[in-house]
Every structure is written in structure tokens, then in C-alpha cells.
Image (cartoon, rainbow, N blue to C red):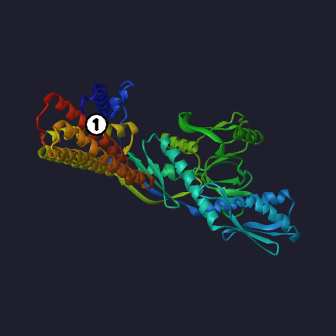
Amino acid sequence: MRGYPTWKAALVGLACLLGLLLLVPNLIPRATLDALPDWLPKRQITLGLDLQGGSHLLMEVDAGAVVQERLETLVGDIRQTLAAERIGYRNLGLRGGEVGFELRDPGTADAVRDKLAALNLRLNSAAGFATTEREFEVTENGGRFALRLTGDGRAQLLRAAVDQSLEVIRRRIDETGTREPTIQRQGNDRVLVQVPGERDPERIKRLIGQTAKLTFHMVDMEASVADARAGRLPPGTELLEGQNGEAAYVVRRRTEVSGENLVDAQPSFQNNEPVVSFRFDQTGARKFGRITQDNVGRLFAIVLDDKVISAPRIREPILGGSGIISGNFTVESANDLAVLLRAGALPAPLNVVEERSVGPDLGADSVRAGEIAGVIGLVAVAVLMAVYYGLFGLFADVALLVNIVLLLAILSVLQATLTLPGIAGIVLTMGMAVDANVLIFERIREEVGLGRTPLSAIDTGFAEAQRTIVDANLTTLIAAVLLFQFGTGPVKGFAVTLSVGIATTMFTAIVVTRLLISLWYGRRRPAALPL
């Protein structure tokens, strides 16, 4: 307390002024902020779904589709491996959730076992290390082999599908320019998506619910759609319907080029009609160029999720690795398709389990209720402190206001998402802030009662109470960090504001309050403390 350093007082004042400056953008409309120079602070607190409204979707990864695709891939791998080794087989296919085939010569069983072992991947542990567990269980009976996913193999396959879905969904949402979406895993096979501020939940469902698996196939121009509908399909072909009920096509099953080779897709216009232009990587461009060069005059089907978007005629070789997708698009649908293609395909379909839309009116009511609760809490605490501790209570009230300013300023810099539980964390911070001051003031009272001088009582009160304040706040901070680490959604919002509030509380209770009392005591030099 003696000779409180001027430089320290200046630093505390500067910190408070900086906090106020960083808080100001929250009081200015976004359009006005965007018009200001870039060097000015513009970051605002982002309101969560419960405060500004938006869309809430809980989606489930289709586990059956994930397993089906993996087993179909295994069928192709086995066919290719056995053919490369010139091993005869028959009846290779997927039946009853398992891949089975029979050897023409049972004497080749030993060689087949070795090849299947090479295809049967070792599973990874939680730490990422390979274990002795295998992806498939292989059984053999008289030259007949059957492969079925193990329980661990199925779990790891689903876990990988959910992880990939999270990343694809995040890329798709980010492409729309939405700020601070919540995208996280729930349980073993579910994904929670919350998009604050989104007024069209159906568009979000279309955007993230579509698998967006893009493939390019040659059209079988000799086959008849009528014959295909009657079940007379040529070998190696399939009948695919057009989008929006348009004409169907008989296409080759073989995928000539995959959407995995796309590096960019953008909405554009051709002949005043919205289209989507795309560009392949080097591998895709080489394949695309070869296919268009060998099939001039033939129809080339562009297929999205087993629906033919368009089937243009190849008029000349396309060697640049780029092309255009047309198909009666609107400007919005062309933009959405470009977003889907840029973000990549989902590993499996997503089924909507739960859907909620929070309207802006409900969000505004929540904000208003939170503001009222915060103001009432602030006023009640301020009045109680002033009545109970007099002038020192007013110092605590000033420190409390600084605490709230710094808390909101830090949330603005972090661009944290403020939710209704987050507001509860702010209100709780108010109580914790004055708790620290109560500890200090009561200790000062005790020291005065023991006969110490005012200056000595203040010094001892702050020094002795500081240890208790730090211990109490650190234990609360540990709990808040654990809530943030293991909590979801609203719990994380509460943990963020509580953690930041603990930091600002320790600063204002110990530093700001002491500075105010120091300045007052240096000017007044009272014989007794007004406590």
C-alpha cells in the first residue's frame, strides 16, 4: 500500500481503458462497423443459437450404408487380388452381411489365406497404434471363404465415418459464411449441428444432408430405357433417373472419373443460365481428357448421389481438366451444388433424428430476460455492498463494473459464442467478484479490531485474503476447464464465461480495488476506516 507505484497504476488504468475500447464494438451495429477503418477494433460477441435464433439438427450416420460400402469395396479388392494371382473362384459376392466366394481349386486355399491376410487390416487403438485385432473375421469351409466385419472393425469404421462427416459438414457450413456454428459428435454415430442466425433450416438440411457423391459415367447409347425398366439391362450397366423427374439413362456402372479428383467448383453463368464450373486435379484432368478424347459424339452422364444431373454430348476432347455442369439450376441451387462439391462427399447418408428451429423472437426474449437478470443482479449486489461496507462497498462496486467490462471485452476478442447459460455464468461472476471483496474487507475489519492502524490493516487484509482468493478461484477454474473439456453445447458456453470471469475477478478484486483504496487513502489519510 505504501507508495503505490505510479507505473503500476498507469498499467491498471490502461488495461481498463483497453477493455472499454474493445467492448464498444458490441454497442455499434454490424453495418456501421464494416464501414469503419480496418485498424479499429471490430470484433463482437457472437450470440448463440438460443439468443439469436437459428437451426438445430441432430443427425445420425447411416451405419448400414457405411458397412455396405466397405463390404462392396472388399468384394472389388478380392476380385482384383484373385485375378492378379490367376486364382479361380466362383460366386463372389455380398450376401447376408458377409462377403463369400468359393475356390475352383481347393488346393489354392493356402495362397488365398495369405492374400486375405494382406487385405485384413489391423485395427488402431485409441492412442492410434496398430493392435492385433483385425477388421474382418475370416472363416473357411472346404474351399469356401466368408469374411464378416468384427465388432471392433465395425465400431472403428463407424467412428471414422462420423469423424469424416464432421469435417465435411464443417467445410460445407463454413462455405456459406455462417459464423460460429456448433458441429460436434454426440454418442457413437450422431452429429449435432447448430447454426445460429440461419433463417432457412430446410436449406441447411439440404446442404449437409446430401451425400454429394459425384461420379462421371458413359451412357450406353445402344440400350433402351424401356427395356431397362422391364428388367432387361445389358451386363455392366444400370438405370439411373434424372433429377427432378427428368429423363432416365442407362449408364455404365464403371466410374470413369470421381468427384474425389475435384479441386474447385464455382457457380457461374452460360448463355444467361446458372451453371456450375468445375476443375480437376492432375490425375482427374488426365482421366477426363482421355475419356472425352476416346468418346467424342457420345453422351457423358454427370451423376450426383445416383441421380443424373445432366448427360451432355462430348463434342470435342476436353484436355484442360475443367468443365461445366448444367441442369436447370437456379442461382441458389447452383451455388449450393458448388458448395457441396468443394466440401467433398459424405462417407454415408445422414438421417435427421431431431430438428428444431429457434425463431429470432424467442432469441430476443432470451436476450432481454438475460439483460434484465444481469441488471437486477448487478444493482442488488451494488446496493448491498454499499449499504454493508459504505465507501469501501462503493469501491467494490466500481471494481465490479470494471470486471464486467473486461469480461465482455475478452469475450469479444475471442469472438466467443454467448449462450443463455453463458449469461448465467456472467451473473455468477458478479457474485464471485464481490465474494473476493467481502473476504478482503472482513479481514481488514478483523485487523482493525486487533488494534492495527488503518494503513497496516489494509495492507495485511489484502495480503492475507489474497491467498484464500487465489486458492478458491483456482479450484473453480479447474472445474470450469473440465466442464469445457467434457461438456457440450450450453455447458461449454457456461464454462467459457465462468473461466474468463474468474480471471477478471482475480484482477479486479485484488488489483483494481486495491488501487482505488490506495488513491483514496493517499488523499484523505483518515484516522479510522469507514467499514
Q: Residue at x 36, y 40 (%)?
A: 411
Tell me residue 52's x, y (percent): 33, 46
> Which quadrant holds the N terminus?
top left
Residue 339 in sight here: yes
Question: Foreground: 106 or 471?
Answer: 471
Tell me residue 45's x, y (percent): 35, 40
Q: Residue at x 38, y 56 (%)?
A: 356
Question: Foreground: 294 or 76?
Answer: 76
Question: Across the whole image, how many numbered discs are drawn on residues?
Answer: 1
Direction from residue 80 to residue 393 in the image, left or right: left
Residue 233 in sight here: no
Q: Residues within 10 Å of mark 1 (few under 14, many from 20)?
A: some
Q: Amino acid at mark 1?
A: Val
Residue 137 sits in which quadrant? bottom right
Tell me residue 291's x, y (percent): 74, 42
Q: Is residue 316 above or below residue 105?
A: above
Q: Is residue 523 above or below residue 44?
A: above
Q: Residue at x 47, y 41 (%)?
A: 176
Outermost residue toward the front in this view: 451
Tell me residue 324's x, y (percent): 62, 38
Q: Is residue 315 above or below residue 76?
A: above
> Which quadrant holds the C terminus?
top left
Mark 1: secondary structure: helix
Location of mark 1 (residue): 511
Direction from residue 349 to residue 479 in the image, left or right: left
Direction from residue 172 to residue 242 in the image, left or right: right
Question: Foreground: 184 or 244?
Answer: 184
Question: Foreground: 116 or 524?
Answer: 524
